[in-house]
Image (tube, rainbow, N blue to C red):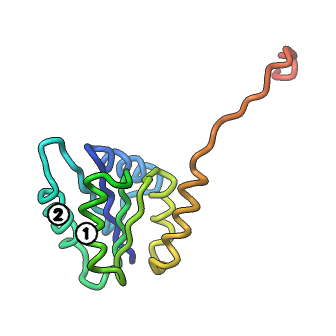
Amino acid sequence: MLAIIVASHGNFAKGILQSASMIFGEQEKVETVTFEPTEGPDDLLAKYNAALGKFDKDDQVLFLVDLWGGSPFNAASRIVAEHLDTMALMTGLNLPMLIEAYTVRDQDLSQVVPHLEETAKAGVKHLELQEDAGDDDDLL
């Protein structure tokens, strides 16, 4: 089963994990890492290593991070760069991406990453409403 680390600036990672749990249920092998204003890169690396320590040694690991180029991304990318065969990193974390990650956890990272990229993009939409024609009788 694919292990997942959800990481963010502040408590966004914890909040989105709670939302995903409400929709999809509690999941095994999912950890959060939060980056607080008083912390630095070494703190993030320690948190990532603690999260990784909760997984099995042979687990593939997917990092889902809030923002490209931010501190959580930079720290995770250092770890992933040393484990390219078993780890992957994606940014732009959103709820459709996380929920979909839960549904494809039995697949290889090489299949999961492009699939989640499309899912995340498809999760961004806008509501387009038509002008009211003034005929409220149709609503009854």
Residue 20: percent from the left, percent from the top?
Answer: 42, 52
In the picture provided, is 135 more to the left or to the right than 74?
right
**Number of numbered discs on residues:** 2
Q: Which quadrant would residue 47 be assigned to in this image?
A: bottom left
Q: Is residue 134 above or below residue 61?
A: above
Q: Closer to the camera, 121 or 31?
A: 121
Assign the C terminus to one quadrant of the image: top right
* Residue 17 sits above or below residue 84 on the image: above
Q: Name the residue at 38% across, 48% down.
A: 16
**Which circle marks residue 130 in the picture?**
none
Residue 19, placed above or below residue 54: above
Q: Nearer the viewer, residue 113 or 21?
A: 113
In the displayed structure, does residue 113 sit left or right of residue 17? right
Which residue occupies the foreground of this view, 54 or 8?
Answer: 8
Circle number at residue 78: 1
**Left or right: where 28 falls relative to 38:** right
Query: Percent from the top left, x then y, of residue 71?
Result: 25, 53
Relative to 99, say whether 85 is above or below: below
Q: Amino acid at mark 1?
A: Arg
Which x, y percent locates residue 133?
Answer: 86, 18
Callouts 1 and 2 close, C-beta under 8 Å: yes
Residue 45: which disc? 2
Going by the numbered disc 2, the residue's amino acid type is: Leu
Instruction: For label 2, count other residues whose C-alpha is less than 10 Å away and answer few (under 14), some (14-19) or many (20+).
Output: some
Q: Residues within 10 Å of mark 1 (few under 14, many from 20)?
A: few
- Name the quadrant of the N terminus: bottom left
Residue depicted at x 25% and y 74%: 55
User: What is the x, y in percent for residue 6?
Assistant: 33, 58
| Distance from Cα at disc 1 to Cα at disc 2 | 9 Å
Taking the spot 79% from the left edge, 22% from the top edge, the residue there is 131
Closer to the observer: label 1 or label 2?
1
